[in-house]
Amino acid sequence: MAVSTIYSTQALNSTHFLTSSPSSSSSKQVFFYRRQSQTNRSRFNTIITCAAQQTIVIGLAADSGCGKSTFMRRLTSVFGGAAVPPKGGNPDSNTLISDTTTVICLDDYHSLDRTGRKVNGVTALDPRANDFDLMYEQVKALKSGVAVEKPIYNHVTGLLDAPELIQPPKILVIEGLHPMFDERVRDLLDFSIYLDISNEVKFAWKIQVRF
Ligand SMILES: Nc1ncnc2c1ncn2[C@@H]1O[C@H](COP(=O)(O)OP(=O)(O)OP(=O)(O)O)[C@@H](O)[C@H]1O
Ligand SMILES: O=C(CO)[C@H](O)[C@H](O)COP(=O)(O)O
């Protein structure tokens, strides 16, 4: 598994691209190619293509409000096609689907809704508030080409909504608080990214969202 950490102190508005990263496991065929245009050597002109035998799984971890969604929108656009919510589904779905990539928000594996967390005195970061067994089963199924009925955590109501059908994509991104906490889920990742955002920047971004 290749690992990359993005530091907020380096460049707040920069995008960090995946570079050539053969998987550590010789049984997999996962390659990201990085190529720059001859005419324009700007890093925003980088093209990435990918060849793989099965669904590639990318894990993106960061604290709440640290730019996971923003980073994923940029990454999926690099992979090709606009990422949009599932058509005709729950308007509060957290999922984004593009031609090549499906982004799943791991908040959907909260085992306790907002009231349940309050009653039990735990935050969403607490492993006890998350269903890692289901997360593992469903990521494993998608990686092996099997569709799943994934739950939805509704950030508007704070409730767990009826599940949505997720088809196996070429590239699956799981983004959230804990893509690397459970060893079984971690072992399914081909590439891991951690957004290491300083508290100063994190609070500034959070205030921007809330006010
Ligand atoms: N690289 C960046 N430069 C400037 N602002 C950013 C950057 N990344 C994210 N932000 C801002 O920070 C805020 C939070 O970003 P975002 O919603 O992507 O985070 P998140 O981790 O997905 O949040 P949540 O955990 O609540 O789902 C947004 O207002 C976004 O515009
Ligand atoms: O986005 C989050 C974590 O990634 C939220 O903090 C978490 O899902 C709890 O949800 P809410 O704030 O709606 O109670």
Image (cartoon, rainbow, N blue to C red):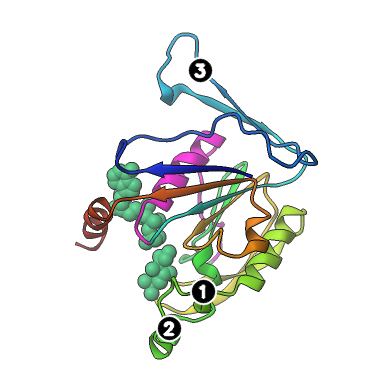
Q: Is residue 3 left or right of residue 63?
A: right
- Name the kind of residue labelled 3 in the image: Gln
Which structural element holds mark 2? helix
Q: Is residue 150 left or right of residue 45?
A: right
Badge 1: residue crowd in 10 Å (few <14, some 14–19, many ≥20): some
Give the residue at mark 3: 36
Give the residue at mark 2: 117
Which structural element holds mark 3? loop
Q: Is ligand 2 less than 8 Å from the beta carbon at label 2?
A: yes
Viewer-nearest residue: 138 or 123 = 123
Q: Residue 183 in the image: x percent, y percent?
A: 64, 62
Badge 3: residue crowd in 10 Å (few <14, some 14–19, many ≥20): some
Is residue 77 visible in the rendered image? The answer is yes
Q: CA distance from mark 1 to mark 2?
A: 11 Å
Q: Which residues are magenta?
A: 64-89
Question: Dividing the picture into quarters, in which one does residue 111 lie?
Answer: bottom right
- Magenta run includes residue 70: yes
Q: Is ligand 2 less than 8 Å from the beta carbon at label 1?
A: no
